Image (cartoon, rainbow, N blue to C red):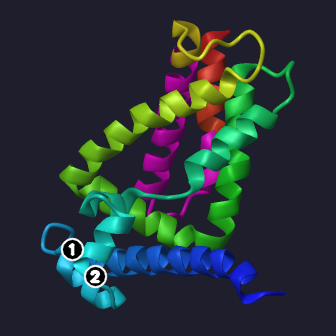
Amino acid sequence: MKTSDATPDWRERKKAQTRRTLQEQAMRLFLEQGYEATTVEEIANAAGVSHMTFFRYFPTKEDAALADDYDPVIAELIAERPADESAIDKIRHALIEGLKRVYTTDRDALLARNQLVLSTPALRARTWERQVADQELIARALSAHSGYAQNALHTRVVAAACLAAAMTAISVWTESNGTLDLPGLINEAFDALRSELR
């Protein structure tokens, strides 16, 4: 194999590693000294890069705390669900399947991040903005199935209700300091949603 053939793959791996290192160092510093007290320069220094490099990966400090690769995975899983399954069940199963991938490997990091978000007003506000974007992403994924229009009120309401159920379960899990089972809580939240809709 020629060296030039391996270069793009190597570059992508290097970028992914730099992004991961920046995020790990950001979380470490946020937890050690507080979100507000931590600067972008400190995060960049801890990761061994310049602050300009930080901004190539994360537009803001909030993004270093909140960014993940979870949402696109959820959208793909929703699009792959059976056509005859209800929208709520499509979202439920996709969320739980996607979550299990993160929960089994990065449970502690997930808990630490959610604890940080709940205790930091700036991150709580940004999470609300991200939830609106997530709602659109889920509505788009549902629209891959016949009968669901991306911009239809019905599709957007279902996506919003399911996200609210999932976020409430995550909040309860975080408040329990991770002692409860998160996938179980999400199932409970969706059961509550379904029972009220009957």
Q: Position of residue 116 (x, y in %)?
A: 32, 63
Q: Nearer the viewer, residue 88 or 80?
A: 80
Residue 24 vertical placement versus 57 (above, below): below
Q: In the rendered image, is residue 33 in sight?
A: no
Q: Is residue 162 magenta?
A: yes
Q: Position of residue 105 (x, y in %)?
A: 65, 72
Q: Could you say which quadrant of the image residue 104 lies in?
A: bottom right
Q: Is residue 178 magenta?
A: yes
Q: Residues within 10 Å of mark 2 (few under 14, many from 20)?
A: many
Q: Position of residue 151 (x, y in %)?
A: 53, 13
Residue 4 vertical placement versus 73 (above, below): below
Q: Give the label on residue 1, or none.
A: none
Q: In the rendered image, is residue 19 in sight?
A: yes
Residue ranking furthest to the left: 37
Q: Position of residue 196 (x, y in %)?
A: 59, 15
Is 190 left or right of 52, judged from the image as shown? right
Q: Are marks 1 and 2 in contact (CB under 8 Å)?
A: yes
Which quarter of the image is occupied by the C terminus? top right
Query: What amino acid type is highlighted by mark number 1?
Result: Val
What residue is pinned by disc 1? 40
Local SS, label 1: helix
Q: Which residues are magenta?
A: 157-186
Residue in the image at 65% along x and 44% along y: 74
Local SS, label 2: helix
Which quarter of the image is occupied by the N terminus? bottom right
Query: What amino acid type is highlighted by mark number 2?
Result: Ala
Q: Give the label on residue 44, or none.
A: 2
Distance, label 1 to label 2, CA atoms, is 6 Å
What secondary structure characterizes most of the magenta part?
Answer: helix
Q: Nearer the viewer, residue 198 or 91?
A: 91
Residue 135 vertical placement versus 27 (above, below): above
